[in-house]
Image (cartoon, rainbow, N blue to C red):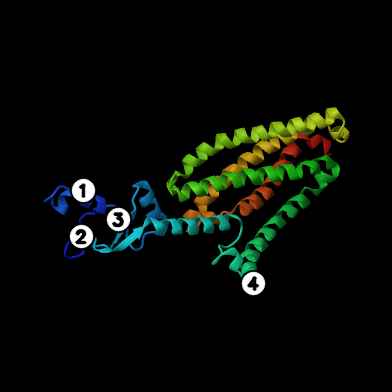
Amino acid sequence: MDDNGILRGVLSLRELLAAPEGARVSDVAWTEVRHVHPTSDREEVARVISEYDLVAVPVVDDSERVLGVVTVDDVIDAIQEEQTEDVQKMGGMEALDEPYMQMGIVGMLKKRAGWLSILMVSEMFTTSALQYFDLELQKLPVLMLFVPLVMSSGGNSGSQATSLITRAMALKEVELSDWWRVALRELPTSMILGAILGIIGFIRVVMWQKAGFYDYGQQAPYMLVALNTFIALTGIVTFGSLTGSMLPFLLKRLGFDPASSSAPFVATLVDVTGLVIYFTVALIVLGKYMG
């Protein structure tokens, strides 16, 4: 740092003591200094310190005058706060302003009730979807047996995907412009995952039928019921994973925190669409048995 406070280089105490006698500071100091600005996000500061294995990073203004330093201890505290905030948001609530045990009941209700209410209202669309296909359920009640299965599988796949992408965004592994690369990567992966779960569902129907645990063929051939389960699970898991992976990009593009695409929110969204996919497949595979 020169007389005007402008950053010219950095030098550790060890390097200063190990320097040859008579050497100038400018000869042993690092002139290519990594620095941050006062307006830099704390995640960016953490990335710089982690990427270049720094103990501290200078904070400079637009004229490169030194305003202070951020130490690795400060960064660790910031990372813990940021991760805690992201985890709480992904859990379907607002981030807490203080430790859990110090949070009052009223404050806790304010942080949790809003999101729970929004999620409940969203789940009402699930009821609407079931009501829309009520006639099909009356004609083929066996379909109702697999509704929890397909809903949970779609929600789980979506929650997985949104957790992976949100974390990748936080680590700067993916940027907003990478959405199409993520989609191309997620599509085959989600289809294979869906097929795996679909095969498990197919085998489950066949095994229960053969073992005599339940007669799925009372209203339609049990092999068609198994086939319907396979196709529906493949489609729902594929849709859930794609939705979960794209939602963080959409939220970031709109200026929201990607962590706000909480797992419960994604699960709720996929529940509704999953039911539509499930019953649409049923109309195709088992349509003649609903007449």
In the rendered structure, which disc, 4 or 2, sits on the residue that comes first in sequence? 2
For the view shown, which residue lies furthest in the left direction? 22
Q: Residues within 10 Å of mark 4 (few under 14, many from 20)?
A: few
Residue to which mark 2 is pinned = 1
Residue 237 lies, with reference to residue 264, above or below; the image says above
Question: Which element carries disc 1, helix, strand or loop?
Answer: helix
For discs 4 and 1, the disc positioned in front in the rendered view: 1
Give the quadrant of residue 10: bottom left
Q: Quadrant of the N terminus?
A: bottom left
Which of the two marks, 2 or 1, is nearer to us in this view? 1
Q: Amino acid at mark 2?
A: Met
Q: Earlier in the sequence, mark 2 or mark 1?
A: 2
Q: CA distance from mark 4 to mark 1?
A: 59 Å
Residue 20 visible (yes or no): yes
Distance in Å between CA atoms under marks 2 and 1: 20 Å
In the rendered structure, find residue 106 and report the number of the disc placed on it: 4
Horizontal and vertical percent position of residue 26: 16, 52
Between 203 and 98, the one lying in front of the other is: 98
The residue indicated by pointer 3 is 35
Q: Which residue is mark 1?
A: 18
- Say which of marks 1 and 3 sits in front: 1
- Mark 4–mark 2 distance (CA, rounded to whole Å): 51 Å
The structure residue drawn at horizontal position 50% and vertical position 50%, both measured from the top left corner, is 249
Q: CA distance from mark 3 to mark 2?
A: 13 Å
- Whole-number angstrom distance, CA of label 3 to CA of label 4: 42 Å
Contact, CB < 8 Å: mark 2 with mark 1? no
Disc on the earlier residue, 1 or 3: 1
Q: Residues within 10 Å of mark 2 (few under 14, many from 20)?
A: few
Q: Specify the quadrant of the image occupied by residue 233.
A: top right
Q: Going from the N terminus, do you reach mark 3 or mark 2 first?
A: 2
